[in-house]
Image (tube, grey):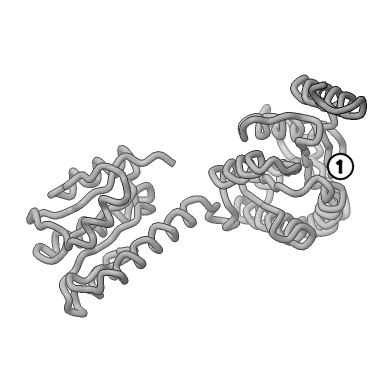
Amino acid sequence: MATTSAILFTPDDLAPPAVVQRWLTALGVPLLCVRDTETLMGVALRSRPRVVVFDSRASADVVLGALYDLKCDSYTGVVPAVVVSSDDFESFDAGFRAGADEVVREHQDVSEVEIRLDAMLRRSDRDLYVHPSTRLPGAVEIERDIARRLALGVQFATCYADLDHFKEFNDRYSYYEGDRVIRILAQILHDVVKGVCHEEGFVGHIGGDDFIYIIPIDAVNEVCSEIVSIFDTLIVYQYSEQDRRAGYFFGKDRRGQLHRVPLMTVSIGVVTNERRHFTHAAQVSALATEMKSYAKTLPGSVFSIDRRTDAAFDEVASAGAARESATASGGEGK
C-alpha cells in the first residue's frame, strides 16, 4: 500500500533521540514535522502515514491527547504510533494507556529500540492486511502470493469461492448470523487447504462471502471436493428446523416479490497456469472471477475448472515441440 510520509508530532520542536531519527530516516519516506492536533488529523485522514512518532517528553498532555484522537478515529486508528517518553515509569505507562503501539524511553538501549520499532511495523502490516472477522489475509496478500508463484515459475491453481443465496440468508437471519456463516466457510477453507497442502496452500479473504485459496494443481480435485462436501454437510444446521426440513424459505426479491430461496451453496471457480501463460496477478484474478461467475450458474455446490488454453501457451508449447524435434534430429541449432 502506498504511503506518503512519516510524521513527527512535536509541539515543542524537540529533536527525537538519535536512534529514533536514524530509524525514521531508514524508512525511506519523507518526514513531516507537525505541531498541532488539527494538522496531524488532517494529514492522517488525507493519506495513511507509515508511522507517527509522538514526542511526549515536554508537553505530555497535548501530545498524548493528539495520540488519543488519532487512535479513536476508525480510519486513522490503524496507523502505527510510537511515543517517545521520559525514562520514568509513569510516562512510559501513560504512552501505552493513550493508545501507543510502542513506547521508546529517552535513554533506552539503542539496539533494543530498533528491534522493537521494526517488530511494531511488522505487526502493523500483518494486522492491516488481514480481514478483521476471519483473520485471513486480504487482497494485498492474495496478489502477493500469486505474484510470488508466477515469479517462481511453479504450477498452481487459484480458486475463487463464493456463497450462493447469502444475501437472502443475511436478510432473513440477520447480519450477525451471516457473519457467522462467513467464519464457518473461512474455517472450512483454512482447515482443508492446510490439511491437504500444508505450507504450499494459501487462503485469503477478499471480503464479504468472497474467498481465494491457492494450491498446487495436483491437489485441486481433492481440496475442492472436500470443501464442497463439508460445506453442504454443515450449512443446513445454520437454518431453523422449519427451513431446514423444507429445503428453502420464502424471501423477497428487489421488486418486493416473494419467491423460494434455496439453502446456501458454495460455488468455486478454478484457474490454473497449466494451459495458460500469465504474466501478472491481475490476469489470474480476472479469470478466476470469470470462472466463479460461471460456477454460480450451475445448480448446487460445485467447483468448475477452466480447461481452456490461451494463444500464448499454444505458442510456447509449439516452440517447445519444435525444440524437442530438433534435439531428437541431432541437437538444437544444427
Badge 1 element: loop
Picture coordinates of residue 7, whole percent (x, y): 24, 49
Picture coordinates of residue 302, whole percent (x, y): 85, 42
Q: Is residue 241 visible?
A: no
Quarter-of-image position of residue 146: top right
**Placement of 173 over or under 85, stated as above or below:** above
Which residue is at 61% across, 46% downward? 145
Residue found at the very far bottom of the displayed protein: 89
Residue under pointer 1: 300
Which residue is at 38% across, 53% downward? 78
Picture coordinates of residue 292, whole percent (x, y): 75, 35
- 117 left or right, relative to 268: left
Residue type, mark 1 in image = Gly
Q: Is residue 109 visible?
A: yes
Which residue is at 40% across, 39% downward? 2
Quadrant position of the N terminus in the picture: top left
- 329 left or right, relative to 250: right
Q: How many discs appear?
A: 1
Which residue is at 82% across, 21% downward? 334
